[in-house]
Image: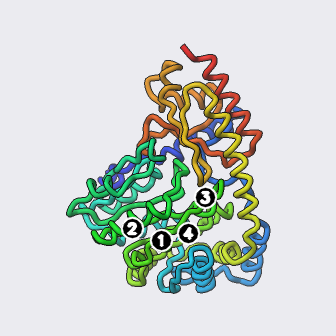
Amino acid sequence: MELSQRVKNISLSSTMEITAKADMLKASGVDVIALAAGEPDFNTPQSIIDAAFKAANEGRTKYTAASGIPELKEAIVQKMARDSHVTIASEQIIVTTGAKQALYLAFQALLNSGDEVIIPSPYWVSYTEQVKLADGVPVIVPGLEENDFKVTVEQIKQATTSKTKAMVLNSPSNPTGMIYTADELKEIGHYCLEQGIVVVSDEIYEKLVYEGAKAESIIAVVPELQNQSVIINGVSKSYAMTGWRIGYAIAEASFIKAMTSLVSHSTSNPTSVAQYAAVEALSGSQEPVETMRQAFEGRLNQTYEKLVSIPGFKCSKPHGAFYLFPNAKRAADMTGFASVTEFVTALVEEARIALIPGEGFGYPDNVRLSYATSLDNLNEALDRLNTFMEEHIK
């Protein structure tokens, strides 16, 4: 069958590709340490599992409203008031099958053919592809390493044209873990407000912050932007619920209605019992979130110090998410590889370590390393990396 041009224009997710390769090696009995996937290694907290079990036993296993159950929307309303001091209404919320679907629906509802979307790089691999799937044009603005990979208002101004429709913001960032300050968000938010640029703000890692850092929602910093933004969030990362597939979007009511129309003709509602589990996640005890956050912070501190001591790696220390994004160009050069991507492939095949090449994030000289695994795994992986460097340095 002849494939559509739409499908031909998109690229396979590099995170999925390298994870699949590592999984294949593991399945054949090879001891591979995967530092690739972006998901917590903790199990979902028991109270959340219990809530899903209770919902199933009570027969809450039928279709729900396409945009999500009222109880979960109310939990999101309360969560925004509690965590961000922002007032929203349930009509401004759509619950989706993961935050990825929320993003996809937002771009589909927002973009016409040829509309431009400013995307700071490094970027999460699906932003560019989802924009292209909506017939939009990704406009990449490089966040400089010396500025913690963050873009400035001046850079955004230079990238703005008459076709600019939206800008993607991701703080804390995947893959860098960097966080925009309130002052930086204020500058960006006011510029977008003045120019009529819609801000699509991906805040999925907001609770995973370290060393006293705080990740602000852009609509908390610039309240006037609430009707000109789409806030993307979910329960996957902070509550160790990646497989439950519950995300959500917050926007003005008419835009949410348009997103709901789209979802009603595609997937319909998110899984019913997963929605009830998410109610418990957002409304119940937040102690498990803090326990995970502290564990990640401890891993970050140890892993960062060990990584930067290995020859060929240069890395800024992040304050959020659970990734390190070191520059590995010198490491590739020292070991005789033509590119960092070739270097990463050799690490999987020889050292049995799975990292993600930065090429898919728009930064081919870097790699993404996830520390969402045990300290034993992290230490062993970095020992293998150090040994690999010692054996291959020319």
- Tag 2 and tag 1, C-beta contact below 8 Å: yes
- Residue type indicated by callout 3: Ala
Q: Which residue is mark 4?
A: 247
Residue occupying image coordinates x 62% and y 25%: 350
Between discs 3 and 2, the one toward the N terminus: 2
- Real-space Cα distance between discs 3 and 2? 20 Å
Secondary structure of the residue carrying numbered label 4: strand
Q: Earlier in the sequence, mark 1 or mark 3?
A: 3
Whole-Å distance between the Cαs marked 1 and 4?
22 Å
Of the residues under marks 3 and 4, which one precedes in the sequence?
3
Secondary element at image label 2: helix
Element class at badge 1: helix
Q: Which mark is residue 189?
A: 2
Picture layout, residue 241 above or below residue 8:
below
Element carrying mark 3: loop
In the depicted structure, whether residue 233 falls above or below residue 41: below
**Amino acid tagged 2:** Gly
